[in-house]
Image: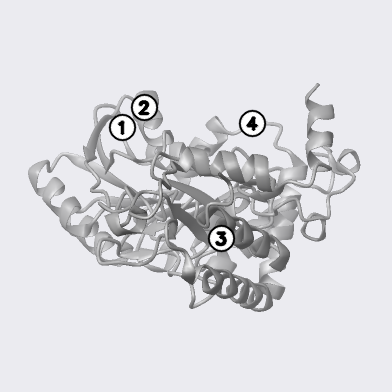
């Protein structure tokens, strides 16, 4: 049974280098008695589809926290936000521009609303195989080639933490007289520290969708949609969310959003200062890696989110492997970490694997991953 399997896994000692951002850290999860918080729209608890009280206050707080004009709580993840943003601004047969490695919600929106999808082929970094993201130049060229495009959807940061130049992209998109939607599902933590890239809310995007649950202390499915400019049709977005979101929204999820927002309002400086320290100590320990490597900023990327640890297994240079037969794929690395070291990564690919971190990770968790990677790099897994 699922309940029994989850209970066993929770007590099994595996460290989560994956979503959700709360990392099963009980000090960041006040909803320990779920049944007692699981209610419906009873008197005094407002209505998500027509918020005028406590839920409206949470949405206002979220908008103030990130600096947007208006924020909407999403209880079906960023997916419903992407669908709503596209559906609110495009009509049947319209064209939308995105990258070929966008989240599945974008082509699903095109299918749902009868839109034509125009895709830019995202270049990849030759060393790691990681996609470099969408550039302002590639977007400008696509808009010149096809002036029928009505909206641009940019994923920033990507799954691997690659950040696009949203400021320049916004200027390009607005020059064409259309809107910019940023799928920032993996970037809800951006903007709270100078050690991280800026949040796209402040960079000229018209709509920004973000998943609190991916990188912050919030339960899975907890997300926000931010209206950032007058170009966005707020009324159409509201109508689309009414259509796409359940009429029985979970108060557990909405309470989790509220708690996350309040926590950041009061304690973001301390939490991100500790997070920065943990990341710096972790990366300092990995300087001596010879065969594995951690993805670092380079000209191919506009910027990187340091909270995403992309562990590259692809050969960096032939000399790294001349003395032994060390050869490892990202899939094999993830499997070794899972079975030998009881560390579960977020995702693996042929040439790299992704460890997701957050303000909820402990110093011991970072140490555990560093120890494991150094051990594997030395060949002790053989």
As helix, strand or loop, the secondary structure at mark 3 comes to helix
Q: How far apart are marks 4 and 3 (CA)?
A: 47 Å
Asked if the residues shown at circle 1 and circle 2 are in contact, with their CB atoms under 8 angstroms apart, the answer is yes
Side of 151 where 58 appears, left or right: right
Q: How crowded is mark 4: few (under 14 residues within 10 Å), some or many (20 or more)?
A: few
Q: Nearer the viewer, mark 4 or mark 1?
A: 4
Asked if the residues shown at circle 4 and circle 3 are in contact, with their CB atoms under 8 angstroms apart, the answer is no
As helix, strand or loop, the secondary structure at mark 2 comes to helix
From the image, tell me which residue sits under label 2. 113
Q: Distance between the residues labelled 2 and 3?
A: 49 Å
From the image, tell me which residue sits under label 4. 246
Counting residues from the start of the chain, the first of labels 1 and 2 encountered is 1
Asked if the residues shown at circle 2 and circle 4 are in contact, with their CB atoms under 8 angstroms apart, the answer is no
Q: Is residue 75 visible?
A: yes
Residue at image x 55%, y 75%? 280
As helix, strand or loop, the secondary structure at mark 1 comes to loop
Q: Which quadrant of the figure contains the C terminus?
A: top right
């Amino acid at each position: 049974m699922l309940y029994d399997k989850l209970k066993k896994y929770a007590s099994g000692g595996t460290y989560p280098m994956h979503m959700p951002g709360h990392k099963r850290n009980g000090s960041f999860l006040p909803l320990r008695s779920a049944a007692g918080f699981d209610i419906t729209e009873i008197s005094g608890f407002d209505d998500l589809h027509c918020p005028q009280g406590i839920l409206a206050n949470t949405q206002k707080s979220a908008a103030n926290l990130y600096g947007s004009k208006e924020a909407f709580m999403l209880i079906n993840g960023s997916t419903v936000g992407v669908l709503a943003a596209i559906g609110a601004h495009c009509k049947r047969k319209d064209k939308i521009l995105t990258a070929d490695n966008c989240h599945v919600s974008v082509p699903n929106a095109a299918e749902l609303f009868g839109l034509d999808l125009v895709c830019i082929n995202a270049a990849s970094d030759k060393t790691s195989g990681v996609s470099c993201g969408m550039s302002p130049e590639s977007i400008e060229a696509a808009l010149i080639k096809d002036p029928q495009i009505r909206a641009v959807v940019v994923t920033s940061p990507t799954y691997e933490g690659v950040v696009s130049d949203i400021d320049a992209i916004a200027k390009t998109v607005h020059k064409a007289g259309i809107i910019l939607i940023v799928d920032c599902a993996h970037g809800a933590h951006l903007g709270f520290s100078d050690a991280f890239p800026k949040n796209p809310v402040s960079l000229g995007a018209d709509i920004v969708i973000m998943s609190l649950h991916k990188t912050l202390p919030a339960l899975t499915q907890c997300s926000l949609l931010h209206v950032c400019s007058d170009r966005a049709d707020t009324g159409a977005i509201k109508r689309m969310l009414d259509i796409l979101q359940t009429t029985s929204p979970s108060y557990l999820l909405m309470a989790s959003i509220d708690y996350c927002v309040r926590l950041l309002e009061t304690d973001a400086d301390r939490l991100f200062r500790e997070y920065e320290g943990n990341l710096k100590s972790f990366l300092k320990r990995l300087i001596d890696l010879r065969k594995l490597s951690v993805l670092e900023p380079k000209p191919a990327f506009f910027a990187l989110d340091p909270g995403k640890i992309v562990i590259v297994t692809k050969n960096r240079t032939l000399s790294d492997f001349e003395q032994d037969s060390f050869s490892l794929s990202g899939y094999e690395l993830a499997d070794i970490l899972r079975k030998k070291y009881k560390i579960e990564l977020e995702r693996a690919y042929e040439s790299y694997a992704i460890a997701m971190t957050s303000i909820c990770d402990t110093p011991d968790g970072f140490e555990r991953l560093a120890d494991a990677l150094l051990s594997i790099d030395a060949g002790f897994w053989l």
